[in-house]
Image: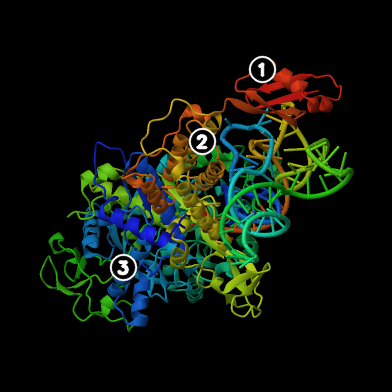
Amino acid sequence: MSRYNPRATETKWQKVWDERNTFVVEADPNRPKYYVLEMFPYPSGRIHMGHVRNYTLGDVVARYRRAQGANVLHPMGWDAFGMPAENAAFENKTHPATWTYQNIDNMRAQLKELGLAIDWSREFATCDPDYYTHEQAMFLDFLEAGLVYRKESWVNWDPVDQTVLANEQVIDGKGWRSGAPVERRRLSQWFLKITAFAEDLLADLEKLERWPAKVRLMQENWIGRSEGLRLTFTLEGAPAGVDGLEVYTTRPDTLFGASFCAIAADHPLAEALAQNDPGLAAFIEECRRLGTSEEAIERAEKKGYRTSIEAVHPFDAGWKLPVYVANFVLMGYGTGAVFGCPAHDQRDLDFARKYDLPVRPVVVPEGTDPAGFTIGDEAYVGPGRLANSAFLDGMTVDDAKAEIIRRAEEGGFGHRTVNYRLRDWGVSRQRYWGCPIPIIHCDSCGAVPVPKADLPVVLPEDVSFDKPGNPLEHHPTWKHVDCPKCGKPARRETDTFDTFIDSSWYFARFCSPRSERPFDRDAVDYWLPVDQYIGGIEHAILHLLYARFFTRAMKKIGLIGIEEPFDGMFTQGMVCHETYRDAQGKWVAADEVAYVDGTARRRTTGEPVTVGRSEKMSKSKKNVIDPTAIIDQYGADTARWFMLSDSPPARDLEWTSAGIEGAWRFTQRVWRLVTGMEDAMVPAGDAAPAAFAESVTELRRATHRTIAGVTRAIDNFHFNAAVAQIHEFVNAFSGFKDTQAAGADWAVREAAEALTLLIGPMMPHLAEELWQRLGHDRLVADSPWPKADPALCQDDTVTIAVQVQGKLRETLELPKDTDRAEVEARALALDKVQRAIDGRPVRKVIVVPNRIVNVVV
RNA sequence: GCGGGCGUGGCGGAACCGGUAGACGCAACGGACUUAAAAUCCGUUAUCGCAGACGCGAUGUGGGGGUUCGAGUCCCCCCGCCCGCACCA
């Protein structure tokens, strides 16, 4: 019996799929479609295990749906713009385009080795001018539709990458990529009006039933809807031209507990006051330096600067509140100004204690005497009734909110507002390797769109990366053009788009990747939305929210008919591995470590190493396993199989050498099992015999139960459960020895074929090879999914558990659907049951048909 | 601080609607085959106690309580770990 040779076999079938264009698909309105998409990779140079897991999961879905009869779109492309290409250009003196396309070539070859059922004819990279020209056109359409604006604003500036970051790209005050503390700068930026869709983006989360609840929740929090009151205080002593201070509050009911007002350091009023107040100017400077960085320590400390002005309480003209500039008030949220009510807000309380401001409770818990209710170190934020609050006294918090909003609106100094945390998306980046923003700046005409006929605005190729900053800015000629409107000399916009724009519509481009327009309407109408999107949780907010926004924006300009791009979303877990350190505490590479007699040692020296916890594979911790090495050694099927075994797809997967070895043994075992049975089966296509021996029927039952079980498991994304059931079936099939019994040769073929088809989505190469040996010309990839016979999925007899007082005492083999009285009698007759009853009177016997009997004494 | 998730053998994990907890894999141990090893095949493996043996009994899904004939699953409280957000007024 020959040993299975994955190397030769895998290449063979990859070639067959390729030559026959097996996975090339066309829209076909007469057939049901299924669009499977995994997040497309950044072409960093080599694939990693995270990719292998991601694309294996998607491939199982793609192949399975295809077998179930769907017209499956499963494309692949490259998220090809971004900074690493520029870093590489700087370090290796290679052009970003050269570096990127070389990486794409490498990674495409690596992905092809995995044997993915991908329509490669649809491949593109976002750095192809053919792709980004449409992005530029869409941007101009968005501009016309009022979804784009330009604004001078404070930005998060990454001093290392020398670029602007979106709020979402700032993590703990540091750049998401460089890790450098972010600074604040004022720049003119292009913004996409994502806030115009804030309400929709929030409300429609409810419709995304096939998304993880966690992701929906994260987006909900990110959008951050709140309801409250915008309220204007009149000011005393304010600079000329400033007549009021508008604040936002979600607790208008606590207005009579106010003891100060506070504004952000960036608030225009603060800036105006600072001009004549050096102390304030210094304080503002201090706040800015803290900015978004190093707050971890400073955060706790509330600081303020008392200005010379006062705010008049809107319901009591004689009541003046001091106005502070405070470090804890954010300019970007609400109006950048608040009133402080220390009794009912912890931050305000901390601030009031520090500056000795009054703390007056105005909400007391139900049934508490207001006179005796005081505030200690903790603000009271719970429900209750209003007190010390004039016309609000005695009301509940909700009633008081409604009443004060009503009065404020009546008095013309406030109105009810819905406020969002979400801010518009700043998309300008001071980088070279991105999609150029198609705008020309003219001294007379302002920002002028590049005429569509002149698109694409292509990146110049002769650039240098010697200087920090944007090479487009340094280029001698590129930016000098004439104004399309007046013809006078003007300058191109030298900023490029945030690369998140590229990935906000690629799923639509895949529907008709060579279209002269962003995509053909017919194609997206047929293919979209994506039925199953698969990727990492790290994109729960950024990418997925942007893509949802972009789809709405594309609908608004009439390009597309849907709002939600991804009908189903699945977030897979990370691939982890143990970590190792030597005696000096330095990381030791995973492939240098081997276990000898249970202890981890350096392969070369035998020196013992400390085993650390399993963590996400990363170069810095040296716990990466190279997929190519694994595929070389074991083949893609084995790697895929291991990826799917054991760990549920949503959870982290721990890579172990024992695990991959186990998967390897299993592929060999399946090979031996099926090829070893070749002589014991009827020829392909033979009709079923009239009768089967009992032992043969048992085998058939196992076959059909496995088909049913695996089908259900794959439907539910429980791939590890599917794997377990296939294992179980292989155990049962291997144990079948009664090959001479009636109908055995037919049932053996049935079992072998079912097994082959069931492993098809997971180990496609092995499946094709076995299928061919079983005498089929058609590919597994073109064959329908096996169907389970319901009659064979059920046993004639059932095992009924017999409990006394809820404790298992014995099991009973009975024909299915034996009637209650019979079951009860049989159960009570059991020796062990009688012993457990021990002569006590039987109070009640619970009989659950075909499952369990419980005797209560 | 707020929000979410998770906690089951030596390990990864099964268990549909509350109905035989530990499927399946890994590891370990014993055996067969072999000159030997690898590979392969067969068997054992939750814990504790009793037993010469077929076996018998008890305990057991992070801890405590509750609902129920019956709880890994439902409810309440607590502990631990992981993730997300974090001065959002």
> Tag 1 or tag 3, which sits nearer the N-term?
3
Q: Amino acid at mark 3?
A: Asp
Look at the numbered disc 3 and give the secondary structure of its residue.
Answer: helix
Residues at marks 3 and 1 touching, judged by CB atoms closer than 8 Å: no
Mark 2 highlights which residue? A740
Which amino acid type is shown beneath numbered disc 2?
Gln
In this orientation, does residue A152 appear?
Answer: no
Q: Which chain is mark 1 on?
A: A
Nearer the observer, disc 3 or disc 1?
A: 1
Mark 2 or 3: the one toward you: 2
When the figure is inspected, residue A104 is found, relative to residue A345, above or below; the finding is below
Give the CA separation, mark 2 to mark 3: 54 Å
The residue lying toward the viewer, choosing from A56 and A524, is A56
Q: Earlier in the sequence, mark 2 or mark 3?
A: 3
**Hey, which residue is sitting farthest left in the picture?**
A487
| Three-letter amino acid code of the residue under disc 1 | Arg
Picture residue at 34% right of the left edge, 73% below the top: A85
Q: Residues within 10 Å of mark 1 (few under 14, many from 20)?
A: some
Q: Nearer the viewer, residue A429 or A448?
A: A429
Q: Which residue is mark 1?
A: A820
Q: Which residue is mark 3?
A: A105
Dots 1, 2 in contact, CB < 8 A: no
Same chain check for tags 3 and 1: yes
